[in-house]
Image: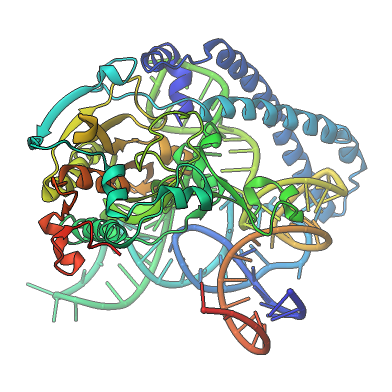
Amino acid sequence: MLDIQQLRTDLENMASRLAKRGYTFPVMQFNTLEAQRKLIQTHTQELQAKRNATSRQIGIAKQKGEDVAAIMAEVAHLGDKLKQAESQLEHVQAELQQILLVTPNLAHDSVPEGKSEADNLEIRRWGTPRSFDFAIKDHVSIGEQLGLLDFETAAKLSGARFNVMKGGIARLHRALAQFMLDTHVQEHGYAEVYVPYLVHADCLRGTGQLPKFEEDLFVVHAGGSNHPDLTAPADQNPFKLHLIPTAEVPLTNIVRDEIIPLEQLPLKFVAHTPCFRSEAGSYGKDTRGLIRQHQFDKVELVHIAHPQKSYEALEELVSHAEKILQKLELPYRVMTLCSGDMGFSAAKTYDIEVWLPAQNAYREISSCSNCEAFQARRMQARFRNEKGKPELLHTLNGSGLAVGRTLVAILENYQNADGSVTIPSVLQSYMSGLDRLAIEGGK
RNA sequence: GGAGAGAUGGCCGAGUGGUCGAAGGCGCUCCCCUGCUAAGGGAGUAUAGGCUCAAAAAGCUUAUCGAGGGUUCGAAUCCCUCUCUCUCCGCCA
């Protein structure tokens, strides 16, 4: 959420910055509502002040044993007027809030201007794509030939965009998550966290998925759709929960409504969770294989940072994600997303793209963003600053990494002519020393 | 699932209709006193808004005692709904 005070004082500038990321801010509507708000709020507060003062007088008079009938008559009609004013105010403020809730973050000055993916800026590459002397296969063929990747069964169980992994691939998948967690905890200083996979709507509003992107989420009810409590307000309804689309949601919301002592900053959290996405609007995209699934695992990194240090933290965060690919010896490149391609909450985003030989392309495997105070303002996540005053934190998140896509990268980059797949050396200790997945080896 | 108790400021804790945004204590900050350490005295110490103002300072003002609603001229206090925590019983991985 943007700072409404900043919008009031610097509207033109803010609107033009939003335009750079392809968002048209409703300037006219905002101005109209603001003018109304000012009028109604002042009026309401005057009425409230009058009521408070009069009530105090009544109290004093009664204590002295004086007659209060005259004063009572004076406020006789105040109640109705006040109620009306209060409800008008509430209405206007809800409308303003609605505008703010669907307005994306401002891009940082260092973000290149652009409209789409095509305008993203490559900033570095690591590793050299391997050249193959045989006809390469994609991860689906590799996995199915090994007998360890089974999309047919997955479709029977749950439909499209799900997968069943077996034997060595299931284990490799597990090994990857363990390896990532261990690296971030032991080498990068993250606190390992286990979090709920079902969260309240408040959490999703806090990180920016709601109210705008509800169609991308899965919602669950306890006890089926006939549960009587479904009629209760969604916010406080314990029987309506959302499946997390990323661990960013629970991890970042850990600091919601908190004031963190200065000396505890930065907080660095890591969690391995499944992620659930409806993938509405991506019909026909990446339909084959593990790239785009309704359910996938991810190791997520979150920093809760001092505002003055959040851009240092972003560089650090990216380097932590890169480290995983380096250890796995997978070639990748790092992109700065242009203003038009960034997510809703981000002020600046780096994508890490891993080399996928079968696609002959680099594909996103991690997205690392600094959201500055955008999420913190929605969450009321603050710290006590050097002057002892509460101040909004900066929040950052990044994949470190998407486990399923990393698995894809390994299957494709480490494939051999005989259909087997070499296990990267850093993972072998997680696989009881196994150094390859062979066709007859899986069970 | 059943029975009961509770939720107040950074923390503890008082407050059952009226000058209560809230006694007292702890903690913290500043000042004073005291030749070590300690102790004592004084002052200050919630958050988010709005208006006045070019701005700052300042002033005025509103809201907030788990959340939402209600009663009332007036609610931390009374009523209703919900959430969470604790204790006991039952059930369960």
Left or right for A35, reference A112: right
Give the camera-side residue of A296 and A248.
A296
Q: Is residue B67 left or right of residue A50?
A: left
Q: Tell me which corner region of the image, top left, top right, bottom left or bottom right, holds residue A254.
A: bottom left
Decide if residue A256 is in sight here. Answer: no
Q: Which one is in front, A193 or A406? A: A406
Query: Which quarter of the figure has residue A125?
Result: top left
Residue A318 found in image quarter:
top left
Q: Position of residue A281 (x, y in %)?
A: 49, 28
Q: Which colour scheme appears in the figure?
A: rainbow
| Residue at 35% across, 19% down | A340
A94 left or right, relative to B17: left
Residue A335 appears left or right of A219? left
Q: Position of residue A119 (x, y in %)?
A: 26, 17
Question: Is A71 in front, or is A352?
Answer: A352
**Residue found at x 41% / y 50%:** A163
- A19 lies above or below B80: above
As displayed, is residue A333 above or below residue B91?
above
Q: Residue at x 87, y 34 (%)?
A: A74
Instruction: Give residue A323's position: percent from left, percent from top.
Output: 14, 47
Q: Is residue A119 visible?
A: yes
Q: Residue A370: horizontal and vertical position, in percent?
A: 30, 36
Counting every numbered tag in the picture gives 0
Which quadrant of the figure contains the C terminus of chain A? bottom left
